[in-house]
Image (tube, rainbow, N blue to C red):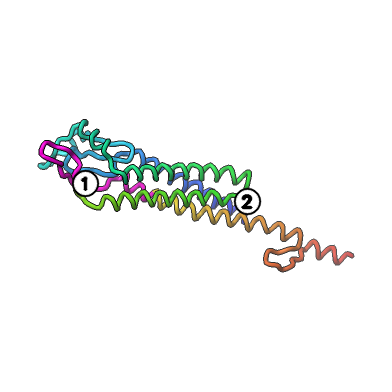
Amino acid sequence: MAADKSNTFKLVFIVLLTIGLILTLISLFTSAWRVYENANQMSFGLVTYDCNDDGKFAGANRVEVNDRICNQWWNARRDYERATMAFMFLALIAEIIALIAAFVLYKMRPRLYFIAPILAVIASLLLLLSFVLYWLKSDNNTLPVLPTTVGPLILSYHFGYSFWLALLAFIVTMIAAIVGFMASKQREVDRYRPTAATSGYSPTGVTVTTHTQERNTRFT
């Protein structure tokens, strides 16, 4: 019964960690961390960007933006955006290693299974750092981002779905880490139980007398 409980925690940990990994991948490689509302609905992510709206935006304050201007902005990204991208890649690497460890350590080194949830905690903290850094540095809804003949063009923007997926990835990965620690703790409990039954020793320091020992005492 206890072994089944440990296996259940392990399965939930792997499923949640896989979901967190997928969310991290989508957040990192999609182009909707920041969406500009009056410039072709152009959107910029950490790795990719999209300046083509295909006629989706036709507001009165529409500003035409060509690929050359988009490339200029992309090449002039700020340091905090590059740092956010680096933290996201590190989180992705930590999630992948944690997922591999969850499979390998469970079979080969059960006593070291706690390493997997520790890696998940590291990944979740990196995701949180990415989200908070991007959010704090993007505290204005308008930024001078596009060069023109008369000066920088002020455009309004909002955070896109890629930004919020990073937060969701953090939440899922942190929950996975908690479940992983529960699975690790359950395995430690299971490891002590057979030892107590066979040797008559309890982890609490109380001597345990098994039914087999009682029967042998009676016959002797």
Magenta segment: does it hold 161? yes
x then y, percent, for residue 88: 39, 44
Look at label 1 and name its amino acid. Tyr
Residue at the disc numbered 2: 111
Label 1 sits on a secondary structure element that is strand
Magenta segment: does it hold 134? no
Extreme right residue here? 220
x then y, percent, for residue 113: 58, 50
Decide if residue 184 is on the left or right side of residue 162: right
Q: How many numbered discs sit on the rendered protein?
A: 2
x then y, percent, for residue 219: 88, 64
Q: Residues within 10 Å of mark 1 (few under 14, many from 20)?
A: some
Instruction: Look at the image and tell me whether residue 1 can be seen.
Output: no
Decide if residue 132 is on the left or right side of residue 195: left
For the N terminus, the quadrant is bottom right
Q: Residues within 10 Å of mark 2 (few under 14, many from 20)?
A: some
- Picture quarter containing residue 46? top left
Q: Residue at 25% across / 53% down in the picture?
A: 139
Relative height, residue 202 to residue 25 (above, below): below
Viewer-side residue, 190 vs 143: 143
Instruction: Look at the image and tell me whether residue 168 can be seen.
Output: yes
Residue at the disc numbered 1: 157
Decide if residue 39 is on the left or right side of residue 29: left
Q: Residue at 48% across / 49% down in the picture?
A: 120
Look at label 2 and name its amino acid. Arg
Question: Mark 2 or 1 closer to N-term?
Answer: 2
Bounds of the magenta span? 144-168
